[in-house]
Image: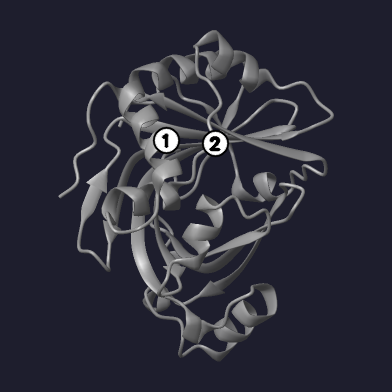
Amino acid sequence: MPEIPHIFAPITLEEMDSIKLMNRIDSKYLTDEATLVRVLEDAAKAGYRALEAEGAQVSPYNSIYYDTPDLKTFLDHHNRRLKRQKVRTRVYVNSGDAYLEIKRKNNKGRTKKKRMSIPLEEMEDFSGDRNATAYLAEHSMFTADQLSPVLSTAFDRITLVNPAKTERITIDMSLMFNNFRTGKKASLQDAVIIELKQDGRAESQMKGILLDNRVKPVRVSKYCIAVTLTDPSVKSGRFKIKVRTIEKIINKKIQVI
């Protein structure tokens, strides 16, 4: 993981939560750690602030993705189904706060996320929690008995906000995957996934910074890349192209063990 080249002025979680991007546009980018250092330097010079939680501006995250036995949520994405969902649990490692999260994409390409707090010990099995199972049934197309854990992801994240508070940027590094069903593991090594959430009515400083550093937008899903790498039996032709794109960016082949 690269060192943050400058100390960013901090922004608190409370300030972050107060930022409402009502006309939000999301875009993702792929790069490597060496290029990320230059992006961070430029962002610091431009006055971006970094989310600081538990005294740290780099935060480890662990997530567990749930799916049906036939991997419906994965295949819906692969088959370009416009209305689709993902279900995961996530823990913010520094604080120990854990959540059940449901991401829904509509036929206009907009993504909405719902989440509720759960005990940490329910990360791999929340089926005995009446509140969690009721929440899942209310906000998703699935019930708890239709889903089981498929794989875990672990990564480190930096979250930036521009001075005008019209952009939020998440930067995910050191990505590692563990497939519970196949037993296979993979790492994206020094690949970096950047997601830009911006107010569509405002000009994006970060887009300019990324362009200056030759970082191009790429549609990519951590869950779908992880399944593609760790489950050779699944239909994944479209995502194999993304894997090759990542390997080209980091100039090395991704190892699966």
Residue at 67% x, 53% y: name it. Answer: 82
Q: CA distance from mark 2 to mark 1?
A: 8 Å
Q: Is residue 215 above or below residue 189?
A: above
Residue found at x 34% / y 60%: 152
Image vertical order of residue 167 relative to residue 234, above or below? above
- The residue at which mark 1 appears reads as 242
The answer to whether marks 2 and 1 mark residues whose Cβ atoms lie closer than 8 Å is: yes
Comes first in the chain, label 2 or label 1:
2
Q: Give the camera-side residue of 240 and 226.
A: 240
Q: Secondary structure at mark 2?
A: loop
Say what secondary structure mark 1 lies in.
Answer: helix
The answer to whether residue 44 is left or right of residue 128 is right
- Residue 192 occupies which quadrant of the picture? top left
Which amino acid lies under the numbered mark 1 shown in the image of this protein?
Lys
Whether residue 218 is visible here, answered yes or no, is: yes
Would you call the spot at circle 2 few (<14 residues within 10 Å), some (14-19), or many (20 or more)?
few
Q: Position of residue 27 (x, y in %)?
A: 62, 34
Q: Is residue 176 left or right of residue 222?
A: left
Q: Residues within 10 Å of mark 1 (few under 14, many from 20)?
A: some
**What x and y, as percent, mark residue 211?**
57, 13
> What is the basis of the colouring in this image?
one colour
Q: Residue drawn 54% across and 53% down?
A: 77
> Which residue corresponds to mark 2?
219
Nearest the viewer among 68 and 140 is 68
Q: Amino acid at mark 2?
A: Arg
Is any part of residue 154 visible from this angle?
no
